[in-house]
Amino acid sequence: MIIVVNHKISNPLEFWASAKKNLPLLPASGVKRVIQVLPNKDKTEATCVWEAETIAALDVYLRRKVFDWSTDTYFELNLAETIGLIV
C-alpha cells in the first residue's frame, strides 16, 4: 500500500536527525520504503510518500523513530487517480 503522511514537526532538529539515521535502514517490520520526502523550507512540515503494509504499521514505525516530534495525518493513496508518481 502507498501511504502519504503529512507531518507537522515540533522538533525539526531531532526529527530530521532521526530520519537521516533510520531511513537508510529500511525495510523494517511492516514498512518497505520511503518513496519521497518533501520538506518545507524551514523543515517544520513535510509530506512523505511511503510503501507499507498498513497505515497502522507505518504509524508504529514512525512513533518509534520520531516520538512526539511531529503530529501526523495519513491517507492511503488512490493509485488509479495519481498523476506523476512513479512507484
Image (cartoon, rainbow, N blue to C red):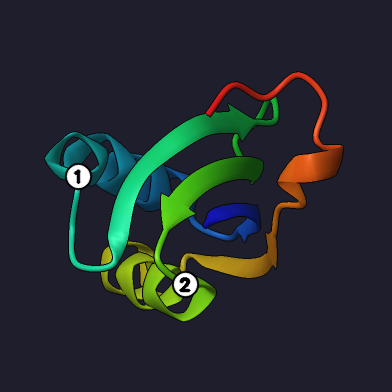
User: Residue at the spot x=62%, y=70% of the render?
Assistant: 71
33 left or right of 68 in image: left
**Count of numbered circles on the image:** 2
Please provide percent x and percent y for residue 51. Answer: 44, 49
| Label 1 element class | loop
Dot 2: within a 10 Å radius of its alpha carbon, few (fewer than 14), some, or many (20 or more) residues?
some
Of pointers 1 and 2, the one earlier in the residue sequence: 1
Q: Which label lies toward us, 1 or 2?
A: 2
**Residue 59, located in which quarter of the rendered image?**
bottom left
User: Residue at the spot x=77%, y=51% of the render?
Assistant: 78
- Name the kind of residue labelled 1 in the image: Leu
| Label 2 element class | loop
Please provide percent x and percent y for residue 62. Answer: 38, 65
**Residue 19, located in which quarter of the rendered image?**
top left
Please provide percent x and percent y for residue 11. Answer: 49, 56
Residue lying furthest left: 25
84 left or right of 81 in image: left
User: Residue at the spot x=19%, y=44% of the render?
Assistant: 26
User: Residue at the spot x=35%, y=51% of the render?
Assistant: 14
39 is higher (above) or lower (below) than 6 = above
Please provide percent x and percent y for residue 63. Answer: 37, 74
Mark 1 and mark 2: span between their CA atoms?
16 Å
User: According to the image, label 2 marks what residue?
Assistant: 54
85 is higher (above) or lower (below) than 68 = above
78 left or right of 14 in image: right
- Name the kind of residue labelled 2 in the image: Thr
In depth, the one of 74 and 8 nearer the eye is: 74
Q: Residue 83 has which mark?
A: none
In depth, the one of 79 and 39 nearer the eye is: 79
Dot 1: within a 10 Å radius of its alpha carbon, few (fewer than 14), some, or many (20 or more) residues?
few
User: According to the image, label 1 marks what residue?
Assistant: 26
